Amino acid sequence: MRVLIIGSGGREHALAWKLGQSREKPDILVAPGNGGTARDARNAAMPPGGIDRLMEFIRAHKVDFVIPGTELPLVNGIVDACTCAGVLCFGPAAYAARLEGSKSFAKEIMREAGVPTADFAVFNDYATAEKYVRDRKRPLAVKADGLAAGKGVIMAAGAEDAVAALRGMMLEKQFGPAGETVVIEDALAGEEVSLLAVCRDETLVLLPTAQDHKRALDGDRGLNTGGMGAYSPAPVLPECRMGEIADSMMLPVLKTMKKRGVPYSGVLYAGLMLTADGPKVLEFNVRFGDPECQALLMRFKGDLLELMVDCARGRLSGASHAAGTKRILQADDCAGGRQGDAALGSGSTTHPDFALNAPQASAGDTSSRLCSPDWTDETALCVVVAAEGYPGEYRKGMTVEGIEAAEARVPGKIKVFHAGTVAEQGKVLASGGRVLGVTALGASLREAQERAYAAVADIRIEHTFFRRDIGGRGLKAADSASGASGPYPERPDTVRGGRRPSLAGSNGSGT
Ligand code: AMP
Ligand code: GLY
């Protein structure tokens, strides 16, 4: 089977690497790919232009199965075009991809489906929006309705900040047409966690939890980025609580999409805020997260190609990974009520600062919520090494060295996923904002963190930085729930071997 992965990030490298392990032995093309996919798969130049050009490319390369890594081709209708052409494609149709492509559409669906989310209002007139934020008198999230490369959300502490954000989006057209309509939400406080599922129609195959680190700098400071690191599982959301979240926040969306005549297919990614009033959905994405995907796939032991093909073919419920002996998570599985699930091993505990009182699903609903057992109980943690300046203007062209040494440090437990790199004449050069995702498995979150940072220390790239506190919130959550007061790892990169990484500018300043 010839598979085409569309994209060039760490997520696409992780997909290519894991799909390459399939029993099917697929021939994997990545367009445009990066330095890592050039090694673990084959790269192909991406044709410039829209979906029509992409379809010509797909036909010319005799692709059997298309996997868009990023949201843009999905929102632009690649699944619809492939369906017309008789080519299998993983992901939702364009209408359903609007769950990510339009924040007002996502909110409308959430409202219709009864999914808990922040209170909000939608505006396409600047004066009315300004009046709303001045009257609202509380911290707000001001969001460009359309796709804005992860930059379209501005948190505003006061009215003046919110007005400035509105001006930028609606009057100065900072995000082009994406900001002509805005969604203004009440700001929620709590811990964020991501819950992803491979979905088809009304069936969900839940993936384990993951936690992203969206801000550029340590301590969640600095600008929002695509993600500076992730780990899975996230102790803030114990495995035994996942089922009720799927039932109250994901399944209702699948049912609503079906009711609207466009059954959902592909990954549904719920970005959640665990608030004092229970979990609420911040956003839906219609693809794997990056870098959550790197951490998740490091833990996946099953046949990813089989899972994705079955989803695209509409055979998810009958598939071997989702039927029969698989563990179906239920709230009752939670030994000791709201305590952690032993299957998660390290630090699987509830956080004392928020409630997980999601509305209960109706009895009998759990048949459509299946959890694949094909995951290692180990924790995976991914540290993103980014070019100085990211998420703004950043430097390029630096030589990347030390990847083999990093991966050899603990064989089979460390994988360096490339993101913004190119392979040129036997060398790897940095070419993007997020350059690498250094990912490690460990028996505990602490061990995964130590291994990942030790591996980062093996890598040499000038003019890059990384966050030093990836996984720190998870350790804190686990420690506070267990009553322990473990040391907060201020400089985890020096934990093992005492070596400072030779990453210039690695003081986490991001500049
Ligand atoms: P979104 O693309 O909607 O997920 O927003 C990006 C990031 O902005 C989220 O991961 C949160 O960190 C933050 N955010 C979005 N909406 C809210 C909200 N209502 N309250 C607090 N933070 C938010
Ligand atoms: N890491 C967040 C995202 O992929 O949207």
Image (cartoon, grey):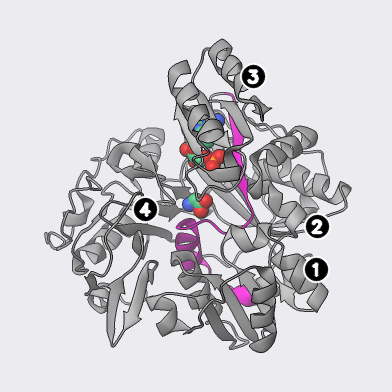
Please identify, in this view, whether the residue under mark 1 or under mark 4 is nearer the observer: 1
Precedes in sequence: disc 2 or disc 1: 2
- Residue at the spot of label 2: 201
Q: Decide whether residue 286 is among the magenta residues.
A: yes
Judged left or right of residue 285, residue 350 is: left
Q: Is residue 370 above or below residue 59?
A: above
Q: Earlier in the sequence, mark 2 or mark 3?
A: 3
Residue at numbered disc 1: 314
Membership of 186 in magenta stretch:
no
Front position in the image: 485 or 177: 177
- Alpha carbons under labels 3 and 4: distance apart: 47 Å
Secondary structure of residue under mark 4: helix
What's under tag 4, amino acid-wise? Leu
Badge 4: residue crowd in 10 Å (few <14, some 14–19, many ≥20):
many
- Are dots 2 and 1 in contact, CB under 8 Å? yes
Question: Which residue in the protein does label 4 denote?
Answer: 445
Give the foreground label among 3 and 4: 3
Q: Earlier in the sequence, mark 3 or mark 4?
A: 3
| Distance from the alpha carbon under mark 1 to that under mark 3 | 44 Å
Image: magenta residue range: 277-306
* Residue 89 spot, x, y in % from top left: 71, 72
**Amino acid type, callout 2:** Asp
- Tell me the element at label 3: helix
Q: Which residue occupies the foreground of this view, 60 or 29? A: 60
| Labels 1 and 4: the sequence-earlier one | 1
Earlier sequence position, callout 1 versus callout 3: 3
Q: Name the residue that disc number 3 marks.
A: 128
The answer to whether residue 331 of the structure is visible from this angle is no
Residue drawn at (51%, 41%) of the image: 152
Mark 3: C-beta under 8 Å from nearest atom of ligand 1: no
